[in-house]
Image: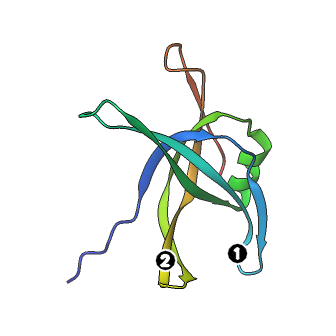
């Protein structure tokens, strides 16, 4: 018996621009946006800003778009998706995050924060 692969992740970060609406004939509406995530390198003390493409389908995407504001801090639970783009050297993988849930974090790490879960 083969053990099934697990494809689930949780990541937090900030959203700098409003989600873009895309319509797909087979899956309806999807909102896409870029999540920025800061990664600290413990050994060197440096940090880097990472960018993740995120897709939120249907009501989840609609709810997020309706409540979005620039610089908003969120936590996404979802899964990785990978498409391939044709280049001159062959195919290049393009990974993105498919959001299953989005938690909106209000406040900062220095004060008492509150969390709102968006309806899926």
- At 71% across and 46% down in the image, what residue appears? 64
Name the image quarter holding residue 99.
bottom right
Q: Residues within 10 Å of mark 2 (few under 14, many from 20)?
A: few
Q: Look at the image and tell me in which quarter the N terminus lies.
A: bottom left
Query: Where is residue 56 shown, x and y percent of the image?
Result: 65, 58
- At 67% across and 41% down in the image, what residue appears? 16
Q: Relative to residue 14, is residue 4 drawn left or right? A: left
Foreground label between 2 and 1? 2
Q: Relative to 109, does residue 80 appear above or below in the rendering?
A: below
Query: Where is residue 14 shown, x and y percent of the image?
Result: 59, 38
Write down the residue under mark 1.
27
* Front-most of residues 85 and 70: 85
Query: Where is residue 44 shown, x and y percent of the image?
Result: 27, 33
- At 76% across and 53% down in the image, what residue appears? 62
Write down the residue under mark 2.
92
* Front-most of residues 106 and 88: 88
Name the image quarter holding residue 39.
top left
Query: Where is residue 26 shown, x and y percent of the image?
Result: 72, 81
Q: Relative to 83, does residue 36 appear above or below in the rendering?
A: above
Q: Relative to 117, does residue 111 appear above or below in the rendering?
A: above
């Amino acid at each position: 018996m083969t053990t099934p692969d697990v494809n689930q992740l949780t990541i937090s970060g900030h959203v700098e621009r409003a989600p873009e609406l895309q319509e797909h004939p087979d899956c309806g509406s999807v909102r896409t946006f870029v999540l920025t995530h800061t990664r600290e390198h413990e050994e060197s003390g440096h940090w880097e800003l990472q960018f993740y493409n995120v897709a939120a389908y249907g009501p989840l995407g609609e709810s997020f778009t309706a409540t979005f504001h620039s610089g908003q801090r969120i936590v996404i639970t979802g899964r990785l998706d990978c498409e391939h783009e044709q280049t001159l050297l062959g195919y290049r993988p393009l990974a993105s995050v498919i959001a299953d849930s989005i938690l909106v974090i209000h406040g900062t790490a220095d004060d008492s924060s509150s969390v709102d879960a968006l309806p899926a």
